Amino acid sequence: LVLTGWLGCSGIQRIPGPTPPESVLPPSQARAHYLRGTLMAAKGDLDAAEAALERARVFDPTSPQILMALAQVALTRGDTTQARSRMADAAHIAPDNPEPWLAYGRLELAFGDAQLGRSALQRSLKLNGPWEARAGLIADALRRKQPSPLLDEWASLKVTDPIELRRRADL
């Protein structure tokens, strides 16, 4: 602010200043762009989806969900290298969140480095990740015709939950 006049202060003028960086703007902006991006991806408009998701990253550069959505767009386009890179970034941005590690592990097992994929799934599992991390590791061991202590442990548990029984049947 600049005060005009010495004692009389006849008026106050604002000095134009720099606009705040967009990363300190309300997180609702990031959420709005993220939702628009996921909607555009679902509609098949990958260019609009990518643009909206990139805009969301401007508002929240530390969101693993935004990077995971960008990875999905890249994968839909067939760019597995870009998808793997984005997913790795998402996992490393949120090292204590099991979801990006699960997605990264699945992507690496399917399209990249199988050892890296197993390592990411194990990390998800250590972080109390969803059952899919355990199932992914078991399925990978079965594909490789390797013994899996996880499978033995999982099979030995007494289960009455119908959802868990269905998960086991699907494996």
Image (cartoon, rainbow, N blue to C red):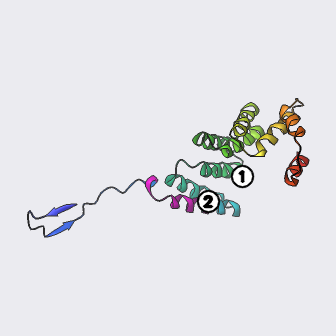
In this picture, residue 110 sits left or right of residue 95: right
Q: Which residues are magenta?
A: 23-35
Looking at the image, which is closer to me, 99 or 145?
99
Residue with the mark numbered 1: 76
Task: Answer above or below: position of 19 versus 112.
Answer: below
Is 153 in front, or is 108?
Answer: 153
Magenta stretch: helix, strand or loop mostly: helix
**Displayed quadrant of residue 83:** top right
Find residue 112 and report its horizontal and vertical position in percent.
73, 36
Query: Is residue 160 placed above or below 8 in the rendered structure?
Result: above
Q: Amino acid at mark 1?
A: Thr
Mark 2, secondary structure of its residue: helix
* Mark 1 to mark 2 CA distance (whole Å): 14 Å
Residue to which mark 2 is pinned: 37
Q: Residues within 10 Å of mark 2 (few under 14, many from 20)?
A: many
* Residue drawn at x 56%, y 60% as measured from the top left: 31
Q: Considering depth in this image, is 163 or 21 the residue closer to the camera?
A: 163
| Quarter occupied by residue 51 | bottom right
Tell us which disc is closer to us: 1 or 2: 2
Q: Give SS at disc 1.
A: helix
Label of residue 137 in the image: none
Residue 45 in picture, x, y percent from top left:
66, 61
First in sequence: mark 1 vs mark 2: 2
Check disc 1: other Cα within 10 Å, few if <14, some if 14-19, many if 20+: some
Residue 130: say if magenta: no
In which quadrant is the C terminus drawn?
Answer: top right
Q: Is residue 3 above or below residue 96?
A: below
